[in-house]
């Protein structure tokens, strides 16, 4: 099995396992490498994270498909964990969704998530009254159907994300969309919510007749008091900690910059920052130099090369 197939079957196995798949959001290759060092199961390529950290842009569909794909490819290269890429609404109309599937699948990504926000989408976590428009359920189902028809491997995973609760359309709309998206071939359903009491989600879990037919995914950013295991007990198979590394990085950079701005001397921030050796080690700098400097002896006829 090639690397992509291994990651895809790992993701599929995880989605059908008794324990939850815990995915953490990466915004770049190094955040993915760090996530890989801890006991997590998958990496989420956060659209919010990539927009914010790689482009200093708001999460409003301003990052193009090719930019998002390039970020996902760098992230995937930096981790052995399966990668699920946030593909927003597929970056446009039906043919954009289809092209997105083809490009991500051919690039070796394990799975993607496509949401039903109309282009240009607006980040789901924004507080206050934000005008939000969703695609009609049948139109989104049509796109999911086209996306599944376009994929070339059995294992590639398409998660269909429902924004009904975020957009204020309620539980019945969410249930109808879940039915439509599963019928269209979605491999999993992500039901998004901002309700910290979990009442909305509980309503969906109680009301959706199709519960259990496909794996269910949660993004508990705004209901952070529920653990991955608690969400598993409620019926979720995958839990995404979507933006914590990004927010940790911003906080750490701000604190260090504040220290340096006050002290105007590097020593003041020494205790706040990673040591140089740690950075060299994270990207295997010494191994790369050793490989570059290794001596090479031309192999004897029929023998193998020797590297010192
Ligand atoms: C992301 O991480 O980009 C997500 C999750 O889509 S959320 O920001 O909650 O919409
Ligand atoms: Mg997103």
Image: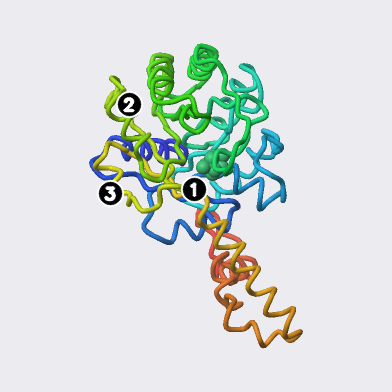
Asked if the residue under mark 2 is in contact with the one under mark 3, i.e. CB atoms within 8 Å, the reply is no
Residue corresponding to mark 1: 242
Residue holding disc 2 = 214
The reply to whether dot 1 and dot 2 touch (C-beta < 8 Å) is no
Marked residue nearer the N-terminal end (3 or 1): 3
Query: Would you place residue 5 above or below residue 90 in this image?
Result: below
Quadrant of the drawing holding the C terminus: bottom right
Taking the spot 50% from the left edge, 18% from the top edge, the residue there is 144
- Which numbered dot is residue 218? none
Q: Earlier in the sequence, mark 3 or mark 2?
A: 2
The residue at 54%/60% (across/down) is: 305
Tell me what residue is drawn at x 62 percent, y 83 percent: 270
Reading the image, the residue beneath label 3 is 229
In this rendered view, identify the residue nearer to me: 293 or 114. Answer: 114
Q: Position of residue 139 (x, y in %)?
A: 55, 13
Q: Residues within 10 Å of mark 2 (few under 14, many from 20)?
A: some
Q: Determine the CA span between mark 1 and mark 2.
A: 21 Å
């Amino acid at each position: 099995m090639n690397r992509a197939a291994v990651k895809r079957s790992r993701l599929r196995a995880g989605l059908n396992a008794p324990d939850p798949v815990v995915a953490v959001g990466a915004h770049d290759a190094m955040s993915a490498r760090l996530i890989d060092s801890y006991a997590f199961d998958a990496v989420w390529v956060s659209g919010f994270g990539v927009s914010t950290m790689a482009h200093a842009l708001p999460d409003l569909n301003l990052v193009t498909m090719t930019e998002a794909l390039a970020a996902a490819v760098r992230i995937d290269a930096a981790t052995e964990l399966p990668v699920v890429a946030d593909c927003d609404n597929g970056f446009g109309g039906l043919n954009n969704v289809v092209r997105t599937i083809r490009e991500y699948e051919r690039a070796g990504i394990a799975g993607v998530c496509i949401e039903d926000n109309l282009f240009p989408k607006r980040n789901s976590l924004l507080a206050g009254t934000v005008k939000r428009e969703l695609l009609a359920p049948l139109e989104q189902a049509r796109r999911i159907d086209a996306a599944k028809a376009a994929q070339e491997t059995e294992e590639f995973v398409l998660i269909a994300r429902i924004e009904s609760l975020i957009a204020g359309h309620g539980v019945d709309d969410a249930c109808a969309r879940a039915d439509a998206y599963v019928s269209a071939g979605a491999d999993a359903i992500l039901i998004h919510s901002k309700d910290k009491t979990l009442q909305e989600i509980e309503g969906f879990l109680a009301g959706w007749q199709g519960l259990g037919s496909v794996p269910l995914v949660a993004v508990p950013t705004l209901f952070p008091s529920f653990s991955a295991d608690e969400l598993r007990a409620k019926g979720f198979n995958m839990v995404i900690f979507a933006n914590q590394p990004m927010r940790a990085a911003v906080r750490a950079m701000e604190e260090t910059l504040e220290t340096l701005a006050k002290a105007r001397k590097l020593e003041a921030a020494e205790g706040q920052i990673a040591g140089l050796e740690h950075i060299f080690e994270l990207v295997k700098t010494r191994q790369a130099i050793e490989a570059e400097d290794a001596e090479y002896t031309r192999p004897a006829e029929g023998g193998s090369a020797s590297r010192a």
